[in-house]
Amino acid sequence: MTHAEAIVSLAQCPLSRRGSRTAPIDPSHWKAPSVAAASGALPGAIEAHSENAKLLLVLLCFLASSKVPIYLLHGGASPRRRWNDHGEFEEASAAHVGLHSELVDLLSSIAELDSTLCELMSISAISENSDQTYTLNRAVQDHVSNYLPPELHSFWRLQALIAAYRSIPWKYIESE
């Protein structure tokens, strides 16, 4: 899946069009209801799954209804080279443009991301494809979308959009 295909897939994702437009949510109130919605979608005891797995699961629900490439997840949260106000290169954090710091920490660490993806695969919440992409279990996606409070949908759409657009390398200052 190319970067352009990933962005188009995000735009076509059913969750990205659901819910009404509401006032911005206080970022301090997104986590507990998000974790609760993901917990109900996962088999077994709630305590059996890491918080990172639950947060990644919700993010995946808003990224695409088909394949999500690992470079979108990792690249979208990793520091990127950008031009500053003086025309020089600097490293820019995803947190600087609105990706929540807990998601930055999870996605920018390839070891943590890989471990979390393996956890989700072990319980069949996602499956790995041969082209280093992941597909979310549709029943899991439906459950999360039904149980996540509608006022959090815009927060998660924004998190997914930030990860998606930041995964695209800038020609001349970053290699793919």
Image (cartoon, rainbow, N blue to C red):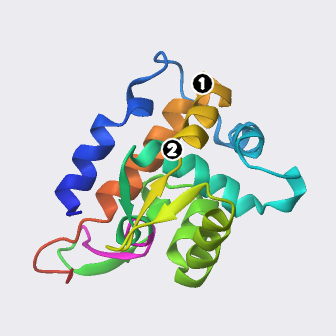
Q: What residue would you read off at disc 2?
A: 61
Of discs 2 and 1, which sits in the foreground? Answer: 2
Q: Which residues are magenta?
A: 74-85
Residue 28 on image: x %, y % = 71, 43
| Location of residue 60 with respect to 155 vertically, above or below | below
Q: What residue would you read off at disc 1?
A: 151
Give the structural element (helix, strand or loop) at label 2: helix
Q: Amino acid at mark 2?
A: Cys
Judged left or right of residue 118, residue 176 is left
Seen at 48% across and 15% down, the residue is 20
The quadrant in which residue 87 appears is: bottom left
Residue 49 on image: x %, y % = 79, 60
Seen at 77% across and 63% down, the residue is 50
**Any magenta on residue 102?**
no
Q: Amino acid at mark 1?
A: Glu
**Any magenta on residue 79?**
yes
Position of the C terminus by quadrant: bottom left
Residue 23 on image: x %, y % = 54, 21
As measured in the structure, the alpha-carbon distance from the residue carrying label 2 to the one carrying label 1 is 15 Å
Q: Nearer the viewer, residue 58 or 154?
A: 58
Position of the N terminus by quadrant: bottom left
Q: Nearer the viewer, residue 132 or 158?
A: 132
The quadrant in which residue 8 appears is: top left
